[in-house]
Amino acid sequence: MTDSPFYETPTFATIEQLKTGRIEQVDHYQLTWNNFLLLTKYQEYKTFILLNNGYRLVINRSIKQVLRDFSHTNHCYARCNIPYYEMLGERNPIKSYVAGRNRLVPSMGTNNAEVVYYMAKPMKMHYYSELQQGMMLMFETSKFAINVMLPAYANKFQKILAQADEISHMHLLELREKLLRYGMEEECNCLVNEYFLHSELTKKAYEIKRHVYSYVLNNLYESLYGERMGDQEMRRLLDILFDTWKR
């Protein structure tokens, strides 16, 4: 494969900018968990790939065919994901491809023509840009770094990623339990999805804060009016207390 002219990639690019210019087209390319950052539809029966070294590539196959090939090559079978999504208890979740810390995550519903499948492991940070009306993803590998703007809705994007992280955590818990049974205690210490644990701890801390404020406010209300505050009034008051700052 020849060097792409996009090897000297700017520090920021939108998906549409990445897909412009001269890009090498091939009939097949073996994608692994570690050799690309994202993929998305290029044209009908063509899929755009951004490799982890900055090269751009178009595979002359539909995105469904490319994903099917990726799943087969990397042994990411239905049994490795679907039963875990069922455990989340949600009907018709938007499913990612997950294998331990490796997560290939769709940015939105998979039937949407603008969907981008991105690798969560090399993603160092992400945030929603109101100016660009999309998600900014910051990737960094040993060979390459880039910030990519994706069209996406913040809440849906976060929910899909959070579910992938939870399934990643389930996979690692299973592996941890197996290593413990095999007497490999030291190897177990690093087997966690840190992003999932951080999110869970943040969520728990937030719940504790709301409970503490609820306790204080209820006692104050009761001392003033002789009765406890109603549930609806308490929720509204807590929502005001914990509302995010808006300029």
Image (cartoon, rainbow, N blue to C red):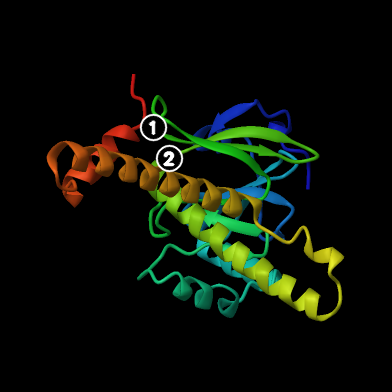
**What residue sits 73% from the left and 70% below the top?**
176
Q: Locate residue 65: give its quadrant.
A: bottom right
Secondary element under disc 2, as helix, strand or loop, is loop
Residue 144's disc is none
Q: Locate residue 181: give its quadrant.
A: bottom right
Q: Which residue is mark 1?
A: 133
Q: Residues within 10 Å of mark 2 (few under 14, many from 20)?
A: some
The one nearer the camera, 166 or 111, is 166
User: Is residue 167 visible to us here?
Assistant: yes
Q: Which residue is mark 2?
A: 151
**What residue sits 27% from the left and 42% below the top?**
219
Secondary element under disc 1, as helix, strand or loop, is loop
Asked whether, in this view, residue 45 is left or right of residue 76, the answer is left
Up-down relation of residue 173 to residue 181 (above or below)? above
Q: Residues within 10 Å of mark 1 (few under 14, many from 20)?
A: some
**What residue sits 46% from the left and 55% below the top?**
160
Q: Which amino acid, by three-letter code, is at mark 1? A: Gln
The one nearer the camera, 32 or 44, is 32
The one nearer the camera, 93 or 143, is 93
Up-down relation of residue 159 to residue 99 (above or below)? above
* Proximity of marks 2 and 1: CB atoms separated by less than 8 Å: yes
Q: Residue furthest top?
A: 247
Asked whether, in this view, residue 156 is left or right of residue 9, the answer is left
Q: Which amino acid, by three-letter code, is at mark 2? A: Pro
The mark that comes first in sequence, 2 or 1, is: 1
User: Total label count?
Assistant: 2
- Residue 64 picture location, percent across and down: 51, 64
- Residue 216 picture location, percent across and down: 32, 40
Quadrant of the drawing holding the C terminus: top left
User: Is residue 114 visible to us here?
Assistant: no
